[in-house]
Amino acid sequence: MILIIDFGSQYNQLIARRVRENKVYCVIEPPTIKVDAIRRLNPEGIILSGGPASIYEKGSPKINPAVFKLGIPILGICYGMQFMMAALGGTVKRAGRREYGFAELHIKRQSGVFKGLSKKTQCWMSHGDSIQRLPQGFTILGSTENTVVAAAANLNKHLVGLQFHPEVAHTPLGKKMLQNFLFGVCGCKKSWTMKSFAKEAIQEIRQRVADKKVILGLSGGVDSSVTAMLLHQSVHKQLTCIFVDNGLLRKNEAIKLKTTLKQHLNINIRFVNAAGRFLKALKNITDPEKKRKIIGRIFMDVFEAEARKIKNAEFLAQGTLYPDVIESVSAFGGPSSVIKSHHNVGGLPKKMKLKLIEPLRYLFKDEVRLLGKALGLPNDLVWRQPFPGPGLAVRILGEITPKRLRILRDVDDVLLEEIKDAGYYRKLWQSFAVLLPLKSVGVMGDERTYENIIAVRAVTSKDAMTADWAKLPHKLLGKISNRIINEVDGVNRVVYDISSKPPSTIEWE
């Protein structure tokens, strides 16, 4: 196991993903973690992340320097390297010339993290401070034109510092450097697989739940479906899933879920049709934040009412993922970003008095998909693209009406059919349609029309933190547009969204 200390870098999750790609388990902890807690974790190695602060600034994040006396191999990246050097007696000062972007790294010693690498390679820099004097016992391993100490190490104590970022794709040999640290320096073994995770998780769930009952709010998405399958294999009939049909689902969504999870996999699910209640409350509401709050409030009311019918339930399960957990910690206590309002983390409704169980809370999205496959979930669920909790409500800009829902459902059905037939569904992070609150003039059958406009959105991404618009073939876009306009009554124009995140978001609302 590798312990990653989070100094606030935007790349923390990427470091963790790089470690886990090598089938090595890792956890991210804030720099406030106690040395005794590190001893209990007993990691094979520690990685100190980068961060936006300067080590000589007041209030900059710090970990107890006693960590360097534990005899555990440590890799410091950017800010993490500077902290290591300063804590051990070196000097860090404002650089005469800041260094951002690509740089050519000249490797002086091809051992340790640089074992098997060529003497020159590209790296990605992002720093305004530099190491001016090394601590005793450290030697320079690599330099760039602007940074003399681009890499340094105390080889006897297995302490390594890299001023650049090996975890990003812009450092082509960065993956190899991390592998050298994991396996060459730390002596890790490739034992982190979803099969091993599933086996341990099932044992832990059985021990914790014992003979009690568990409730799970099922959405039909990847996270909740994998959570349901994992709990089902752990406690079987002690699990009750509650699926609330809010009237804002895709075409035949509830029917498909009932067929897949209830009939084929024999998972215990209660279906609650509350569409009328949701649509009534959303009538004449156009503000996106008001929509979300109304949907969230009614969902919780409906869910709680159904949950109260389940006697002797002691646990509420949620499909919380590791990015949600990481983002729930504020700057310097953890990452700089604060949790979004729609994430699961943050506790339970006070009324419910249930214990929380989150079996996926240490997994990333790609790992959840692999876990789903290991548990035997069908590909349609495992590779399902993300779908927002408020459903089509955030893809209908303006008022939500039965007619506008019908239009978007039919459009969405055509779009996804074409995306799948063209072999793009699994290549894209998300692909969906948005119904705009605008109408435009068109001509159909020699007659003037004044109908709705549909925006098609398709993006590629690794984790939704950033995303690029998908360069779909013009022929495919033409076919999608042609089918939507010809087959869906009420649409006469289709546009394609070519904005990336940032500055845009993936969803429109």
Image (cartoon, rainbow, N blue to C red):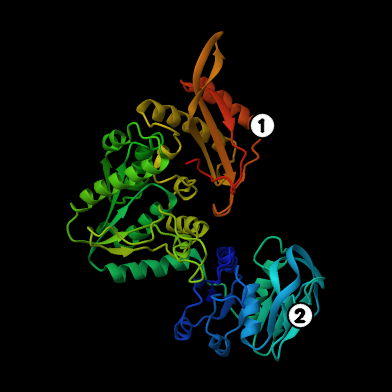
Q: Nearer the viewer, residue 197 or 249?
A: 249
Position of residue 395 measured from the top left corner of the image (x, y, whole percent): 46, 37
Q: Position of residue 377 (x, y in %)?
A: 43, 52
Number of numbered discs on residues: 2
Q: Which is closer to the viewer, label 1 or label 2?
A: 2
Residue 141 is marked as 2
Q: 161 left or right of 268? A: right
Q: Which of the numbered marks, if any, corresponds to residue 436? A: none
Q: Residues within 10 Å of mark 1 (few under 14, many from 20)?
A: few
Q: Is residue 266 above or below residue 497?
A: below
Identified at 57% across, 40% down, the residue is 458
Residue 140 percent location from the top left of the image: 76, 82
Determine the secondary structure under disc 2.
strand
Relative to 208, 467 lies left or right: right
Q: Compared with residue 172, is residue 91 higher up or lower down, i.e. above or below?
A: below
Whole-percent x, y for residue 79 in the image: 63, 73
The answer, for residue 7, to whether it is visible in the render is: yes
Q: Which mark is residue 474?
A: 1
The structure residue drawn at horizontal position 43% and vertical position 39%, both measured from the top left corner, is 394
User: In the displayed structure, does residue 32 sit left or right of residue 399?
Assistant: right
Mark positioned earlier in the residue sequence (1 or 2) = 2
Three-letter amino acid code at disc 2? Leu
* Quarter of image, res 234: bottom left
Q: Residue at x 74, y 67 (%)?
A: 98
C-alpha gap between disc 1 and disc 2: 50 Å
Disc 1 and disc 2 in contact, CB within 8 angstroms: no
Inspect the image, locate mark 1, and give the three-letter code of the amino acid beneath it. His
